[in-house]
Amino acid sequence: MLHTDIPTRDDVDTLATVRKHPCVSIYLSTSPLPQESEKARMELKNRLTEAVQQLRDAGTDKGPIEELQETLDDLIQDSDFWRSLSYSLAIFATPDSVRTFRLPNRLGGALEVSDRFYLKPLLRAVTFPQAAFVLALAQNSVRLLEISAESPVYAVSVPGLPSDVADAVGLPSINGRTQDSHIMGGRIQGAEGQKVRMRQYARAIDRALRPVLSGVDLPLILAAAEPLAGIYRSVNSYPNLTEAIIPGNPEETPDEELGRAARGILDELYAAELDGLKDRMARRAAHGRAVTDLSDVARAATYGAVDTLFVDIDQSVPGLVDEETGAVTLSAEDDAITYGVVDEILRRALLSGAEIFAVRADDMPGGGAVAAGVRFMV
């Protein structure tokens, strides 16, 4: 299966509060295929060498550098870790700690050394994870699939998942007349009885899925025919079940075909969400409640005025942002002293509770590196 651990908003907020030197942020392109893990491991070794050189050039004390090397060397030597990857790997290290996230998005490689973490690429995975689960549900079978933007479809093992309706209710078959003293005075039969059993089946599936989906914030797309689709929806407890479904009986549909259909639903879901966000920003701009100039957005973020922030995931602007005024000083150097101005704006907006959307250039309101809806003008 695809191994992912997409960060929650709390995870990102925790990373955003870290301020110490050195903080090293590394993004690697990886593969879920174990035989390709050595390439990613070697890339991390190279990135660590680059980070150490940046720190030496900046005059960092020898002790923290050696501690950082030891922290990341431990990760490099962890063979079990490198056997379980996704399509990108984000690593956030200090001399005494390391956090990793395996992401289904295909992110470009990056290294940032500063006194704070580089979070912008990570926010892309939070904004639009490009991954989902598909519950392929029929009376005689059920399976849970995991999909991402470009990967093969993976079957997810779900302990306790019933094999079919009859298995869920402990009967050899749900056809015909059955006795049950708690339903309809002791007797249900025909289509009515089958619906009762299908509802029991749906509840059993929902119970089995809870521990697997707990803490996960990915969409769940249902592939099923009526009436089972409606029955499952009526008992579902997972909050991210999509309105759109893949119709029809999925028993004879190959997993890859279900994956293609699910990716189409994801594309429509995210496109609609982006359109709605851009419309909201346009309305705010019409009322003087949106800013797109880099310096204006930096100042608004510093004073806690930003409530919605768009950032261009691909645009890098090295420099510094004044701690008190938010004044921006741009730099031609990307070293261990400077940091990404856009990322620092993002960090400050995060810590004031703003919604953050990391998008591609074509989806940026105003066409710049940042755009913000503000609570008040500063």
Image (tube, helix red, strand yellow):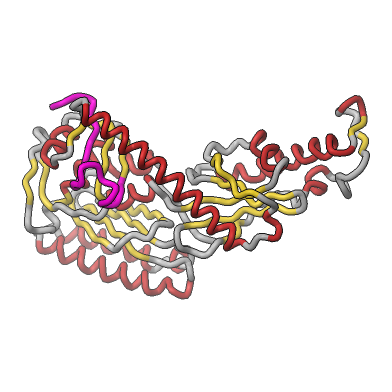
Relative to the observer, which residue lies in front, 365 or 297? 365
Residue 369 relative to residue 43: left or right: left
Relative to the observer, which residue lies in front, 357 or 365? 365
Asked whether 175 falls inside the magenta stretch, the response is no
Asked whether 370 falls inside the magenta stretch, the response is yes
- The quarter of the picture where the C terminus appears is top left
Residue drawn at (15%, 38%) of the image:
298
* Rendering coords of residue 148 (x, y %): 47, 57
* Rendering coords of residue 285 (x, y %): 21, 31
* Rendering coords of residue 261 (x, y %): 55, 55
Residue 344 relative to residue 123: left or right: left
* Rendering coords of residue 283 (x, y %): 27, 29
| Rendered view: 187 above or below 139 | above
| Rendered view: 109 above or below 266 | below
Residue drawn at (75%, 42%) of the image:
201
Relative to the observer, which residue lies in front, 69 or 313? 313
Quadrant assignment, res 271: top left
Residue drawn at (80%, 35%) of the image:
196
> Which span of residues is magenta-colored?
358-378
Residue 343 relative to residue 74: left or right: left
Residue 79 relative to residue 214: left or right: left
Inspect this view and state whether residue 207 appears.
no
Inspect this view and state whether residue 89 appears.
yes
Quadrant assignment, res 306: top left
- The quarter of the picture where the N terminus appears is bottom right
Total numbered circles: 0
Residue drawn at (16%, 66%) of the image:
53
